[in-house]
Image (spheres, rainbow, N blue to C red):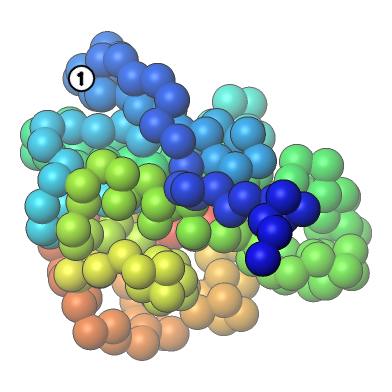
Amino acid sequence: MSSTQRTPMPARLVERFAETTLPTVHGALRCVVFRDAAGVEHLALVAGDPTGDDVMVRVHSECLTGEVLGSTKCDCKAQLDRALDLIARRGRGAVVYLRQEGRGIGLGNKIRAYALQEQGHDTVDANRLLGLPDDARDYAVAAAILRELGVRSVALLTNNPHKAEALEAQGVRVARRVPHIVEVRGLARRYLEVKARRMGHLLEDGTTFRPARHDEHDEAHREAHREAHCAAK
Ligand SMILES: [Zn+2]
């Protein structure tokens, strides 16, 4: 059979493209840039040796409005900072930073959804009015990056059981889920209830608590407040 007409499948979902040690306010972290098949560049910030089991991992999706502009509509920056601080202090772990803004719907659609929220719709309804999914994030790239780093199983920093399931569906072994609780300020607080009520996120007051197999209650739970994810919100 001739294969000249076929587009060859990429050998890998991601290519390890560049890396350096990056000094940060959290400490020095290894910064590894991966390119996916579409040419989009994703990052892994790594502390210590990421190979092996039970590696503390945060899979984090880009939020320009929160992380760069300081938007108070979500707590993405606080979550990112906490994850980087945690892995730097522990001396082992990785933050996989995916370039999928607004739960994967992109910056423009996220801002359109914000505009609908100004008219009183919540984050879920706003996306639906735009004909977009509540969550368009894709974790295949994250799984490929973790494989490239040599991570065999993860202690996953998240309050979102769906994220653990999505990663497991991509072949990531989630040894346990570690609550990732940050203090929420500003408008983000308003969206917590929507996240819990409509998207299955876990809040510390237990109102929508659905225990996962690998739940772990670490010190974070005690110090904590709640999580609002960076949806289009
Ligand atoms: Zn955000």
Image position, residue 219 (x, y; %): 13, 57
Q: Nearer the viewer, residue 27 or 121?
A: 27
Dot 1 beta carbon under 8 Å from ligand 1: no
Q: Is residue 66 above or below residue 123?
A: above
Residue topped by disc 1: 27
Q: Is residue 165 left or right of residue 108?
A: left
- Quarter-of-image position of residue 191: bottom right
Residue at x-position 35% and y-position 27% = 32
The answer to whether any part of residue 83 appears in the image is no
Residue at x-position 29% and y-position 57% = 157
Q: Is residue 21 left or right of residue 42?
A: left
Image position, residue 221 (x, y; %): 22, 63
- Quarter-of-image position of residue 220: bottom left
Q: Is residue 77 above or below residue 60?
A: above
- Quarter-of-image position of residue 174: bottom left
The answer to whether any part of residue 133 appears in the image is yes
Q: What SS does tag 1 mark?
A: strand
Residue at x-position 55% and y-position 41% = 36
Image position, residue 200 (x, y; %): 50, 79
Q: Quadrant of the C terminus?
A: bottom right
